[in-house]
Image (cartoon, helix red, strand yellow):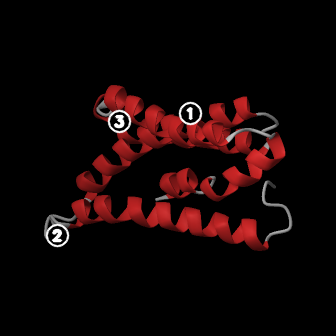
Amino acid sequence: MLFLFAAAAPSPLYAVYAAKLHFSPITLTEVFGVYAIALLITLLFTGSLSDALGRRPVILAGLAIQLVSMLAFLFASSVEWLFAARILQGVATGLATSALGASFVDLQPRQRPWLGPVVNSATPALGLALGALTAATLVQYGPDPLR
């Protein structure tokens, strides 16, 4: 849920970034969309990585990349920084969600075999919704939305 929370959090900020960095609506769309491309490529090529390396190392790598992505957003001074942050965010989310999803299934109790799939289905939507809602609230009512 944390990764998808973080993935949705910048969405309400893009208009603020566009005004601050003076880029076009097309560029804004590209910044928004590059995340999905990075996510899909990462899932395609690393989806089974946690089967080979173990769940924990892949999840930790995803966390580290996510942290770098968040720092890139925090210090973004140009649209190129936003592209880099979104690409890193897509890679981090792809790594982590595949490993976390497999972990949920691995760790589900035998008496409740439905639990892993339910968690895997519910947490992405919940994370996306809470991330966008939290960021939108901070943009609307916070003193400096980009800090």
Question: Tag 2, which secondary structure?
Answer: loop
Q: Quadrant of residue 107?
A: bottom left
Residue found at x 74% / y 65% = 139
Residue extending farthest to the right is 143
Q: Name the residue under label 2.
A: 112
Q: Mark 1 belongs to which amino acid? A: Ile
For the residues marked 1 and 2, what is the alpha-carbon distance in whole angstroms? 37 Å
Q: Name the residue under label 1.
A: 87
For the residues marked 2 and 3, what is the alpha-carbon distance in whole angstroms? 24 Å
Q: Residue 54 carries which label?
A: 3
Q: Which mark is residue 117?
A: none
Q: Which of marks 3 and 1 is nearer the N terminus?
A: 3
Q: Earlier in the sequence, mark 2 or mark 3?
A: 3
Q: Mark 2 belongs to which amino acid? A: Arg
Residue found at x 49% / y 34% = 91
User: Is residue 88 found left or right of 100 in the rendered image?
Assistant: right
For the residues marked 3 and 1, what is the alpha-carbon distance in whole angstroms? 24 Å
